[in-house]
Image (tube, coloured by chain):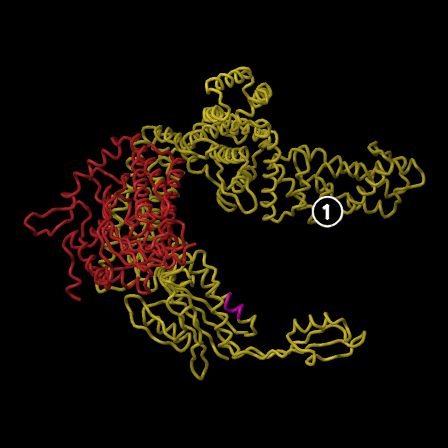
Amino acid sequence: MPDLLIELFSEEIPARMQGKAAADLKKLVTDGLVEAGLTYASAGAFSTPRRLALSVEGLLAASPAVKEERKGPKVGAPEQALAGFLRSTGLTQDQLEARDDKKGQVWFAVIDKPGRPAAEIVADVLEQTVRTFPWPKSMRWGDGTLRWVRPLHSILCILSDEAGAEVVPLDIDGIKAGDTTHGHRFMATDAFSVTSFDDYAAKLKRAKVVLDASERADHIWAEATNQAFAQGMEVVEDRGLLTEVAGLVEWPVVLLGKIEEQFLDLPPEVLKTSMKEHQKFFSVKNPKTGRIEQYVTVANIETADQGATILAGNGRVLSARLADAKFFWENDLRIAKAGMQPWIDALSSVTFHNKLGSQKERIDRIAALAREIAPAVGADPDLAEQAARVAKADLSSEMVYEFPELQGLMGRYYSDAAGLPPEVGAACEEHYSPLGPSDDVPTAPVSVAVALADKIDLLTGFWAIDEKPTGSKDPFALRRAALGVIRLVTENQTKLELLKLLSFANGVISTAIRRFEDSKLEDYLKQASQDLDIPVEDLRAAHSKAKEDAKQFDDSIGSMFRYFRMGAGARALLGMNLDEMPFVKSIRRGPDLLSFFHDRLKVFLKDKGIRHDIIDACIAMPNNDDLTLLVKRAEALSETLKTDDGENLIQGFKRANNILSAEEEKDGVSYELDPDPKFAENDEEKALFAALDQAEATIKPAMEQEDFTTAMAAMAKLRGPIDAFFEATQVNSDNQIVRRNRLCLLHRIRTICGGVADLTKIEG
Amino acid sequence: MAEKLQKPRSFQEIIMRLQSYWAAQGCAVLQPYDMEVGAGTFHPATTLRALGSTPWSAAYVQPSRRPTDGRYGDSPNRWQHYYQYQVIIKPSPPDLQALYLGSLEAIGIDMKMHDIRFVEDDWESPTLGAWGLGWEVWCDGMEVSQFTYFQQVGGHDCKPVSGELTYGLERLAMYVLGFDDGNEMPFNDPDAPIPLTYGDVFREAEAQYARWNFDVADTDTLLQHFKDAEAECARILAQPAEDPKTGRRIVMAQPAYDQAIKASHLFNLLDARGVISVTERQAYIGRVRTLAVACADAFVQTKAGGYTPENAA
């Protein structure tokens, strides 16, 4: 049972790609081997900046020979059928066997597939793997055509067993496989040969290369925390950075350095971000002061001066960076303390989207929305509007220009520096949240109002210009925004009439778009003047007259009037088209955007284990724009359906509903009258009357209080009486009075259950 | 070896050592291109010569201008005029990394004492329609060079691939010479009868250009120059390949490319004057790219670009 060792040695592989590349190498090679009949006992993949390695143990020495039997056409079948079979098997007719089958004699092909030696299979599989490797980005080099993430220099590929190691013969575009590799770029420059994986890993270590990325990461973390601990410090944990740094070194050497005193008053997030993004440093905190005072850098080399030169160099680079950051911070603070107005003004020259105007205009809309939303979330409308107006001011600051990931957070610092209320500062920081399904949701009312306004403006805006997400494309992250709204509303248990809010937001955005389009009027006029050879002044006069006429209706209805008064010629002239009119668009998009929310809600609740048909049953009910209500209803229904009674009730309900619907259709009437218990013929029927009365008495007040759990429990209790009723009773009695009464009884079941959720949507 | 490791003493000594190192590696040591460019890559010795199949190997200093980086000579590490050292070899040799490291040793960086790292950094020039994969090279956490394998230039696949090295000379020199403020580093030998610092040479001009770039340059004129360069580039490229006077085939890729370079620098000046909005920016970059791509299309129709009557399309 030989072992296989592969190493692909290249120039530096980007750190972020190494982990997946090692996993891909393992999967592609082992899948290829197994598919060719070479099974194995175990496999492990490794990566360093300069190499991907794969060790496969307990491989078959050769793939087993296989005898494949295939059944062909009947003996005496048409010529073509036999010819086709021969072609597909690669045999001649005299190599076929005629065998007895149930329906007579049939041709059989017996194909012997001899086994292939492991080396041959490995060579094929590895070549295929290298040529089709799924790098996120790959390149060519020199005058070759081979693609790899960076130039590929050598391939080590050996099969080894007790007898020794043999190189797998392989040549990919002039790169011949061998049994040699290189160690560390600077600390061990000579090539060496290896005979097995153990030999490889051991010799690499001697040549100053730690093959296993997790071993490097563990070493870095242990060494960093030890050195910090010795000075009474703590390293700030950052798994992502640790993985990245482990991918930047083959021989990690951890160095602890001090941040210059003059920079220690910078906000800790600024220190952390600057050190991480630019230098890949870990932050080191002093638990006594709570400040970040030192850093850990990881070098790739041991030096005679124990890294003193390296550390000094890194320290100088850091000081230069932090001097920039300090400069930004101090400039920013000056503007913040004076009230941030220049930043807000500057946002009017920053385009948000070429059809939706500037960032400043967007902020105006968010402010209007935040004010509108405030009462529903328990926030002070003035405070909400104020917060919305400054929430994005930090986008103009130098610090956020340098470190975009600090947006929001810097907003809080600057809002505080401006002396604004703490609620405003919190909203600056939190209004982007939640950014994902597991991100924290803000709970402070002002933050919630601004966060909702931010997202609803985004959604209605892109809806208005018809930039909706399609398939996998969602360039403006609208799905994330909708999920954000859902989580903000439901996790804060907010009662929000979403439709009303969306229509308000539509009004805001339509006005804005109209204003924006008006600003483009001059361009239209110029174009039209050229095309029609009418002076611009005449066109402008005609246009303002048309506008004047419709002035008193300066809302979405107004634009409809304007449209029709203008006449077809003027409309064509101004490039207006009924479908493009804001009011038509807003009418069309109202329910559309709500159903987008419902779709996102389905995904959201599905992740919480609530089936999509349950959600559909709740969406079909009134007030479905109250997301909190909708979720409560869906959760209660989901719980109810998990009980035995609940599950069976559905069957009973459906039976009642199906019979009723069928009879209604047949008779052309609906049986909505109150059924009368005096026509009940058996005990089960009488019991159902009583049970329905009882259920209704519980369900009605519970529903009024939106207590779905109680309502649905009461509904589930109907299961027994309904089942018993159907067991004992034939609905379609010959006595027409009894029949009609029973159908009315079924109607009551439909009404009572249907008032809780639309159970017809439940599957199964 | 010991002599090699001796530290250079001035900015110009670093340049001279790089020149002689790359000359020894067989590069043609060229002089800077005589036009205003934003980076060494714009030199036709890189942009145009990276196209087509003809082998090429050159090294040169390129004075470069980024008007928005002007700080009136007050910044320790930012100037609107600065130097890049550029090496371009086609096809990229298999030992290019080793050659590069040799150049660091040549300017006195001891590989046994410093931490040299190749950190992913993919290069893209939207104005040149060019991109490549490679790294920024770190020395003790400081970015000292850009190392790129060109994959596409002017919209053309690079076949063969050129290897490009770009050294930011000021930053590199500050590191090697041990200065935190670039203006203070010696430009010539510090023991020369008249020792000059980098600031002595450039500080005054930096202030003058900063004032002109930011506040004085006439934007209407710049805009007109931009349009003129654009039109002239198109006009040059619209000429038939055969020259009516000499009867020879002369595709004027490089004169056209000069106009593209001009347009690019004029755009940078307009940008520094703050008259280009965020949305317009993309449009301007697209216009310059259109020129660069057209010049690249023309260059591959020249002999230097690999054109032969046999392979003519």
Judged by its main secondary structure, the magenta piece is helix
Place of residue A596 in the rendered image (x, y in percent of width and height, measured from the top left): 59, 39
Q: Is residue B162 above or below residue A446?
A: below
Q: Residue at x 73, y 41 (%)?
A: A714
Q: Residue at x 61, y 29 (%)?
A: A587
Residue B241 or residue A41, whichever sits in front: B241
Q: Residue at x 84, y 38 (%)?
A: A665
Q: List the single residue furthest toward the bottom.
A: A163
Write down the chain letter for disc 1: A
Residue type pointed to by label 1:
Gly
A721 relative to B70 in the view: left or right = right
A30 falls in the magenta region: yes
Q: Would you name the residue on which mark 1 appears?
A: A646
Residue A437 or residue B55, whichever sits in front: B55
A709 falls in the magenta region: no
A698 relative to A733 in the view: left or right = left
Place of residue A248 in the rendered image (x, y in percent of width and height, measured from the top left): 35, 59
Total number of numbered discs in the rendering: 1
- The secondary element bearing badge 1 is classed as helix
Colour displayed for chain B in the image of the structure:
red
Residue A263 in view in this figure:
no
Residue A648 in view in this figure:
yes
Residue stretch in magenta: A28-32
Place of residue A506 in the rendered image (x, y in percent of width and height, measured from the top left): 55, 29
Q: Residue at x 29, y 42 (%)?
A: A325
Q: Residues within 10 Å of mark 1 (few under 14, many from 20)?
A: many
Place of residue B245 in the rendered image (x, y in percent of width and height, measured from the top left): 31, 46
Chain for colour yellow: A
Q: List the single residue furthest toward the left.
A: B193
Q: Quadrant of residue A82?
A: bottom right
Q: Is residue A504 above or below residue B48?
A: above
Q: List the single residue furthest toward the right.
A: A734
